[in-house]
Amino acid sequence: MSGVYHLEIKETPEELKELLANQKTATGFERVQLLYLLKTGHGQTISQTAEIIGRNRVTLHKWIRQYSSGGIEGLLKQKSSPGRPRSIPTWAETALSKRLQEPLGFNGYQEIVEWLEQKLGVNTCYKTVHKLVYYRLESCPKVPRPKSSEQSQAQVEAFKKTLQTT
């Protein structure tokens, strides 16, 4: 019969059905569905299976080649694009995170920009530093409040004890 594709599918229909239920993405579901339809005989030809799934037959042939070369892992392997590299490298980010934990802190984001440039040699802009510190590191430039030299620690503790909280 013309168009019938002979593919040795190692998994049982029960295993494929379980894999179908566990798929988190639509593409993974479609790929496992291809194997399930071919294994159970619901899709007798690639063209018929392509119609059922709603994909082009060339796409199904590509998936079959992936399955033949890498098994089920090769078929379900997700490609991830590397994306644009961060303007502040991870080593500088960890150094900044450690510096933010110190009690001295920074006076503001502009001071962090200058510190990155002078100490680490990382040239970046204010907006990038703000997004990194505030959103990614979930921190803020820490500045201790000024304390009076005349302030007594005993008086502070006594005030805290007598302060009424509601």
Image (cartoon, rainbow, N blue to C red):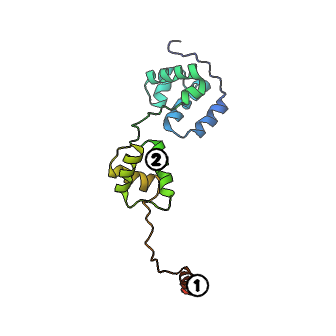
Looking at the image, residue 114 sits to the left or right of residue 37; the answer is left
- Is residue 94 positioned above or below 58 on the image? below
Res 35 seen here: no
In the picture, the disc for residue 52 is: none
Of residues 119 and 25, the one nearer the viewer is 119
As measured in the structure, the alpha-carbon distance from the residue carrying label 1 to the one carrying label 2 is: 41 Å
Instruction: Classify mark 2: helix, strand or loop.
Output: helix
Residue at image coords 61%, 25%: 39
- Is residue 159 positioned above or below 89 on the image? below
- Is residue 128 positioned above or below 32 on the image? below
Residue at image coords 42%, 44%: 120
In the picture, the disc for residue 93 is: 2
Residue at image coords 46%, 61%: 104
Pinpoint residue 56: horizontal percent, then vertical percent.
43, 25
Q: Quadrant of residue 143?
A: bottom left
Question: Disc 1 residue type?
Answer: Lys
Please state the total of marks drawn on the protein image: 2
- Is residue 45 positioned above or below 52 on the image? above
Pinpoint residue 40: horizontal percent, then vertical percent.
61, 26
Res 91 seen here: yes
Q: Quadrant of residue 33?
A: top right
Residue at image coords 45%, 67%: 144
Question: Around disc 1, counting alpha carbons within 10 Å, would you say few (fewer than 14), some (14 to 19), or many (20 or more)?
Answer: few
Of residues 99 and 51, the one nearer the viewer is 99
Q: Quadrant of residue 20?
A: top right
Q: Residue furthest top?
A: 1
Of residues 80 and 153, the one nearer the viewer is 153
Pinpoint residue 129: horizontal percent, then vertical percent.
38, 51
- Please give the residue where the numbered disc 1 appears in the rendered image: 161
Of residues 81 and 78, the one nearer the viewer is 81
Q: Counting residues from the N terminus, which is met first, the one under dot 1 or under dot 2?
A: 2
